[in-house]
Amino acid sequence: MDNETTKFGFTQFAETWNGRLAMLGFLIGLLTELMTGQGILSQIGLM
């Protein structure tokens, strides 16, 4: 990893972690749907 002076904004470091956390959130949402049998919107009461 490069020694960047800032860790905020559109840096390679920030974008890498953003992608990793997005994939983790998607996986958690998918597993929750499979375990409960309900979609995310119905779980939070919007449908």
Image: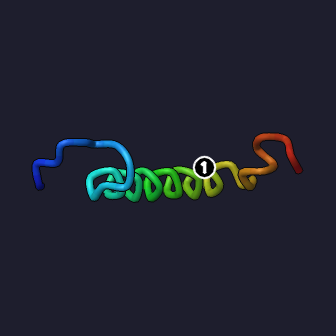
The residue nearer to you, when weighing 13 against 6, is 6
The residue nearer to you, when weighing 36 against 21, is 21
- The figure's colour scheme reads rainbow
Q: Where residue 24 sits: x, y (%)?
A: 44, 52
Q: Residue at (55%, 54%) from the top-left corner?
A: 31
Q: Residue at (68%, 49%) from the top-left corner?
A: 36
Q: How many marks?
A: 1
Helix or strand or loop: what does disc 1 sit on? helix
The residue nearer to you, when weighing 18 against 39, is 18
Task: Say which residue label 1 marks.
Answer: 32
* Mark 1 residue type: Thr
The quadrant in which the N terminus is found is: bottom left
Q: Quadrant of residue 5?
A: top left
Residue 33 horizontal side relative to residue 25, left or right: right
Q: Residue at (81%, 49%) from the top-left corner?
A: 42
Q: Quadrant of residue 33?
A: bottom right
Residue 13 horizontal side relative to residue 21, left or right: left
Residue 26 horizontal side relative to residue 34, left or right: left
Q: Is residue 32 above or below residue 12?
A: above
The residue nearer to you, when weighing 20 against 27, is 20
Q: Residue at (47%, 55%) from the top-left corner?
A: 22
Badge 1, how many Cα within 10 Å: few under 14, some, many 20+? some
Which residue ends up furthest to the front in the rendered image?
A: 5
Which residue ends up furthest to the right in the rendered image?
A: 47
Q: Where residue 30 sits: x, y (%)?
A: 58, 58
Residue 39 horizontal side relative to residue 21, left or right: right
Q: Where residue 44 sits: x, y (%)?
A: 77, 40
Q: Where residue 9 sits: x, y (%)?
A: 38, 48
